[in-house]
Image (tube, grey):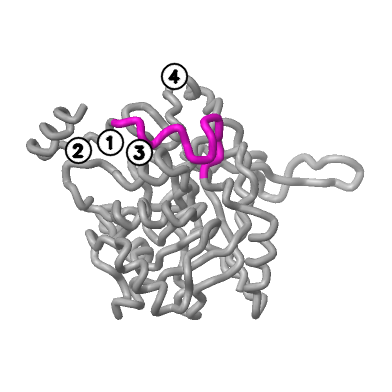
Amino acid sequence: MYRTLVLAAMLGISLNAHSEDWYPSKYGAADTLGAINNLSAEKVLQAARLIKTGKSYALGVETGPDSPAYPPRQYALTVLQPGDGTGATMGSNRATGNDDMVLLWMGIGSQIDGLGHMGLEHRYYNGLQASEFVTPTGLQKLSIDKLPPIVTRGVLLDVAGHRGKAVLDPGTAINSSEIKAVAKAQGVQIEKGDVVLFHTGWLNVSDTDPAKFMSGEPGLGLDGARYLAGLGVVAVGSDTWAVEVIPHEDPDQAFPVHPELLAKNGVYILENMDTRALAADGVHEFLFVLGQPRFVGAVQAVINPVAIH
């Protein structure tokens, strides 16, 4: 093995992506929840004490047919029982109503990526092989419906504000040194069980130029992802569509931060979080509340978390 490592080093080859040192999980070989294990009733009570004004912030964006989305994801809604105010009614009280049906990719708009979303060489969180849990009709493990509510302390890192910019440029990588610097400047400390959100200003681009919005983004680098995972955070989110920096730091890799957080560390990813109002109000820590929809077998889900300050 030593000779293999030496040869790999000489050739500049990394063996980490293909090694098994990232599983079994530190939360146990049979665990399916990952960093959600770092939530606790005590953490909820601590986070509740952060409420000072009672103001609530919706972190989810509106989701519709024009929402920028990673291709070929899309949204289509049909209203059933449509009418023009005439036609049959129900019962002696003449009740009327409408219903709706959605054809929806779960990974559109504001979303949570579950631990079954991305892995390495068909292995996912805790080393689960795809053949062990992935079926066409849903995940048998790691699915969104199995997650408890995520209620904890939220931390907003306003990286755009720290750099004195309204919108960070695509390809801007956020790594551990900057995370530490922004947290120190804001007077906050990232703790075990937190949800950490980044404000980059990139969501503003989606309002004016959806094609540009999807062409790249500022975001989390690998070093930053490893740093946050090491702190024991439950989830990492941003006002971007993939959370991680695009173009990637290593152009030969594909979405490297996703498997680093999801598969290797059990840390959830929250995409397209609308952090603008929080940043504008200078809110850096708050009660974070997410009761995600419990779609059986789902890999991801459209969400609208709430921050309460």
- Residue that numbered label 4 is attached to: 131
Judge whether 88 appears above or below 138 on screen: below
Of the two numbered discs 1 and 3 on the same chain, state the one appearing first in sequence: 1
- Residue that numbered label 1 is attached to: 17
Q: Is residue 278 left or right of residue 221?
A: right
Q: Which residues are magenta?
A: 19-34
Q: Nearer the viewer, mark 4 or mark 1?
A: 1
Residue 250: % across, % down: 18, 48
The residue lying furthest to the left in this view is 10
Label 4 – label 3 distance at C-alpha: 24 Å
Label 3: element kind: loop
Label 4: element kind: helix
- Residue that numbered label 3 is attached to: 72
The N terminus, quarter of image? top left
Label 1 – label 3 distance at C-alpha: 28 Å
Q: Are circles 1 and 2 on residues that touch, CB within 8 Å?
A: yes
Label 2: element kind: loop
Of the two numbered discs 3 and 2 on the same chain, state the one appearing first in sequence: 2
- Determine which of the numbered discs, if any, sits on residue 14 in the image: 2
Q: Nearer the viewer, mark 4 or mark 3?
A: 4
- Identified at 80% across, 42% down, the residue is 89
Label 4 – label 1 distance at C-alpha: 20 Å
